[in-house]
Structures are given as structure tokens and as C-alpha cells.
Amino acid sequence: MKTRAAVLHEMGMPAPYAESKPLKIETLELDEPEHEEVLIKIKAVGLCHSDLSVINGSRPRPMPMALGHEATGEIIKVGTNVTDFQKGDHVVCTFIPSCGKCIPCKEGRPALCERGAQSNEKGEMLAGGRRLHSSEGAINHHIGVSGFSEYAVVSTHSIVKVDSEVPFEQIALFGCAVITGVGAVVNTTQVKPGSSVAIVGLGGIGLSAVMGAKLAGARKIIALDINPDKFEIAKELGATEVYDSSQSDVIDQVKEHTNGGADYVFETAGAVPAMKVAYGITKRGGTTTTTGLPDPKQEFSFPQVTLAAEERTVKGSYVGSCVPPRDIPHFVELFKQGSLPVNRLLSDTISLDEINDGFDKLANGEVNRLVVKMD
Ligand SMILES: [Zn+2]
Ligand SMILES: [Zn+2]
């Protein structure tokens, strides 16, 4: 069948993207779903910094690639051996397929699925191969989803069934921003009630971490960003204090006002300067967790003595250490109860044709989350 999709042919094209148009909207041929795959009518898909990292080339992927991963939609056809899903189900896509068979999957750490990481890196489906084609050949899949498209064929190991009452443009955010940000707080770091938390970087993941910290019962939630426009929403979501992290003395400012720093600090910007601030404002005995994915050539360093002498912990968190079929329905339920106001992350909806302009807004920090709403 045919599908209109946003395809990236070349990484590193100059911003503004509204002019250089790195994403081309093309009509592609989409194959039928195969073994343990489904065909989804995509309804909504968020613009994420991980898409931007492929567009700007800081996380290189094979080209050409159909981008988009924070996607949701309705199953319209199932392939063979699909037992847990049926036509009409609303599903959210997750950006690491979990095979269920490798050691990390068996250990309950599907974010580290070995086969999932390999297929994502190659731009293939979990089962191998590609289901999207143009007249010039196969098109690579973006992390098993390729959601900026009218239709997508995805592995059943890349989807989670969700509540059909929640609007698509809101439920899309659970697939990436929410599980990454909330999961980093409640799963990876297991923030204790009454503790102090700081979050460096207030994009979709950082604001989700603010919500997660409130949910976890943090006494103090310190929000930092280089863009003060983010402070208002951070406060609305639960931040008790805000700081401009571009100021050269920000570490001293936070330490002074927090009696030596925060118990748990999250770096969500994926940038070494943000990680330096995060480590600097972590108190003695505290934990610094990063969810960011900077350019692989970037290195972060710190005085090693602080690890032992101050009993410091540095952690990485991928997909919020979530088990998506377990955590996404829980987070959606908390959203419905009002304790995870994920709808507040949504700045606006746009059409597929406005996608390059949308990535300019995301890159410039003008929006929290923009979602492409498909007809
Ligand atoms: Zn993402
Ligand atoms: Zn696996």
C-alpha cells in the first residue's frame, strides 16, 4: 500500500529547516505486516530531540531513513502469529523493540535488548529487513517505528496497547518523553519521598521528570534551563525553584540555596555543559542520573576522588529503565487520575507538511512538545 511519510536523505543540513527542508514528504510503498507485526494507521506522533539528533547528524543513522518514533495509532491489520493485539486496538510505539529472548530482556531490562539495539542501528525491523520502499530502493526504519507517516508496519515487540479514551495527541507522548522522564525518576533512580531533586534541561523529558519528582513525593524540585521561558511551565508542573543554568555561577547559587546541593539530580539535555552543572549541584552522597544522548564524541569528566570521598553515584537511564507494557498503562492511569498532567507538555499540533518548521521550533526551545496529527 501507499503511505505519505517524512524521509531524511541527508544528515547535517543547515538550520533553519523550514528553508533547507531536510525532511521530504514522499509517497512510499509499505509492505504487508509479516510474522509478529501489525499495520497501524498512525494518528499522532511527537517531534523529539532524538529525531533532531538524526537530522543534525549528531547521532548518525543509515540514510535514507523515514523518521519519527513517538507515535500512536490504531491497528488496522495484523500479520501472522499475532496473539496479544487485534484490529481496532489503540497502541503506543516504543523506541526499543524488546525481543523477549536475550539476557537483558529476560532480566526485565528491555531497554537494553540486544537484538533491538542491533536492528535499530541498522535501520531494520526487529525481524530483519525493511518494509518501506521508494522507486530508488529500501528506506531505513527509524528505531523500529518510522512514525511520521500515514501508516506504519511495526513489530508487536515495539507496541503497547493503551486506553482508547485518551486522545491520540496526548497518548503519543507516553511512548518517549513520559517513559524516559518519569521512568528515570521512579525506576532508574527510585527517588525517595521527602528528598530534594534537581532537573537540568526542561524539554519534554525534563518536564516529565519534574512531574515524576512530584509524583515521587520530592520535597524540593529545582528546575534549571538555559531558556528562562521554560520556567513558568516547570513551576506549574511542580518545580519549587528555578535557575538559569547559563549563568556562570549557577552551581554556587543552587548549592547555597539548597544547603550543599540536591539528593538526586537529572541531566536531560544530552549536553556536557548540562551534565557538568548536574554533577556540580549533586550533594555529598547524592545521585546524578543522565537521560541525555549527546554526540558520541563528547566526553564528560569529573574529579574521581569525589566518587569515593563523597559517596557519589552517577547513573545512566535509557527509556527510563521502563518495562513499557508494565509502565505505560500505569502512567496513563496516573494521567487519568490527574497526578501526571502529561497534556500540559503538548504545546501544539501540526500537520505532516509543517514538520520542518516544527523541528526549528523544537531546536530553538520555542515549544515543549509538538505533535503531528494525522488525518
Ligand atoms: Zn524520543
Ligand atoms: Zn531482547
Image: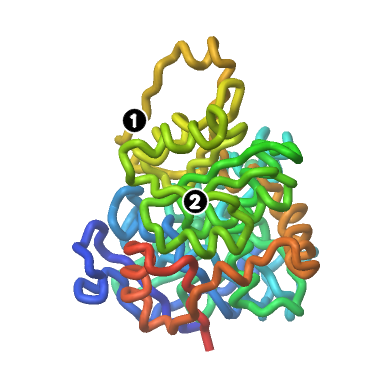
Crowd class of label 2 (few under 14; some 14 to 19; many from 20; radius 10 Å): many
x%, y% of residue 372? 48, 77
Asked where in the image residue 270 lies, by quadrant, the reply is top left
x%, y% of residue 260? 54, 27
- Relative to 339, does residue 241 appear above or below in the rendering? above
Q: Is mark 1 within 8 Å of ligand 1?
A: no
Who's the residue at 59% across and 53% down the image? 239
As measured in the structure, the alpha-carbon distance from the residue carrying label 1 to the one carrying label 2 is: 27 Å
Asked where in the image residue 161 lies, by quadrant, the reply is bottom right
The amino acid type found where label 2 is placed reads: Val
- Give SS at disc 1: loop
- Relative to 66, does residue 176 appear above or below in the rendering? above
x%, y% of residue 320? 62, 46
The image's mark for residue 299 is 1
The amino acid type found where label 1 is placed reads: Glu
Residue ID for mark 2 = 242
Who's the residue at 37% across and 51% down the image? 226
Q: Is residue 70 left or right of residue 101?
A: left
x%, y% of residue 302? 40, 22
Crowd class of label 1 (few under 14; some 14 to 19; many from 20; radius 10 Å): few
Who's the residue at 39% across and 33% down the image? 276
Nearest the viewer among 208 and 89 is 208
Q: Look at the image and tell me whether residue 341 can be seen.
A: yes
